[in-house]
Amino acid sequence: MENNRAIVYNGSFKYAELKKQNMLDTLYKLIMAGLLFGIWQIAAMKIDSQLLLPYPAVTMKALLECVTDAETVKNILITLGRVMKGFVFAMLFGLPLGFLMGFSKPADKLLGGFIDSIRQVPIMAWVPLTIVWFGIGDGPTIFLIAFSGIFPVILNTIQGVKSISKDYYNAARSMGAGRISVFLNIILPASLPDILTAARIAIGAGWMSVI
């Protein structure tokens, strides 16, 4: 009975701490937003030009008009669809390459130089080629979104796989685990935090590359 009470107490204490932390995080965000709007308002008053820097209230009013306009919402959904398609392609191609290069040294040496050289090319340099390859339409846009997101996925997945301690592999193999079992029970769970980080970076890069 005492153990149950202790468990309940510890759970309630952790929940209260988590709730307090979330409230603090929200407070910090509100303070930062207030500071930004305050600086914006002061700068707009000093410049006194709606063309160069409109007031926050004017901008918020225009934003509200945009998000309530049916045509604008339609275009936003179309853009969101393109970004999600590009993101899915980046994950579909980036994850297998990242796992392969992270787990296999020959694959890393074979593909590493090629991938490093391609990712140095500015995204805008690919625009003419994508138009030639895919024509006018969603094809070039989706390709560029996927292209900008695939490299964070590959690099973070490689880092996640390489950071796994060799002790886990040795322990699994000593118990007779095969390659598929090692991948599903060791590599995938251990590299998941890096994969989630890669997904966040990839979706952000995809939004930035929408043209």
Image (cartoon, rainbow, N blue to C red):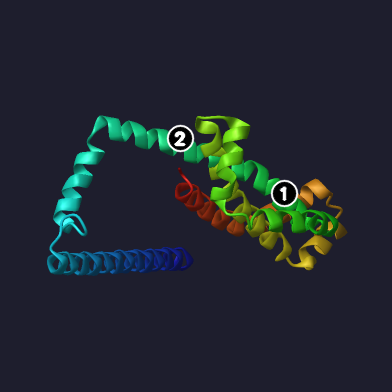
Q: Is 195 on the left-hand or right-hand side of 35? A: right
Where is residue 127 drawn, in percent x and y? 55, 43
Residue shown at 61% from the left, 33% from the top: 132
Q: Which residue is mark 1?
A: 97
Residue shown at 81% from the left, 58% from the top: 172
Q: Which residue is mark 2?
A: 81
Residue shown at 82% from the left, 55% from the top: 110
How packed mark 2 is, by other alpha carbons closer than 10 Å (few <14, some 14-19, many 20 or more), is few
Would you say residue 88 is visible in this rendering? no
> SS of the residue at dot 2?
helix
Q: Quadrant of residue 35?
A: bottom left
Where is residue 61 drawn, in percent x and y? 16, 47
Q: Nearer the viewer, residue 49 or 38?
A: 49
Q: Is residue 88 above or below residue 24?
A: above
How packed mark 1 is, by other alpha carbons closer than 10 Å (few <14, some 14-19, many 20 or more), is many
Where is residue 69 drawn, in percent x and y? 23, 34
Residues under numbered marks 2 and 1 in contact, where contact means CB atoms less than 8 Å apart: no
Q: Nearer the viewer, residue 28 or 40?
A: 40
Residue shown at 73% from the left, 63% from the top: 162
- C-alpha span from label 2 to label 1: 25 Å
Q: Which mark is residue 201?
A: none
Q: Is residue 84 above or below residue 35?
A: above
Q: Is 40 on the left-hand or right-hand side of 108? A: left
Position of the C terminus, as image quadrant, is top left
Would you say residue 205 is visible in this rendering? yes
> SS of the residue at dot 1?
helix
| Mark sitting earlier along the chain (2/1) | 2
Q: Quadrant of residue 187?
A: bottom right
Q: Label 2 amino acid?
A: Gly
Q: Label 1 amino acid?
A: Leu
Where is residue 98 drawn, in percent x and y? 70, 53
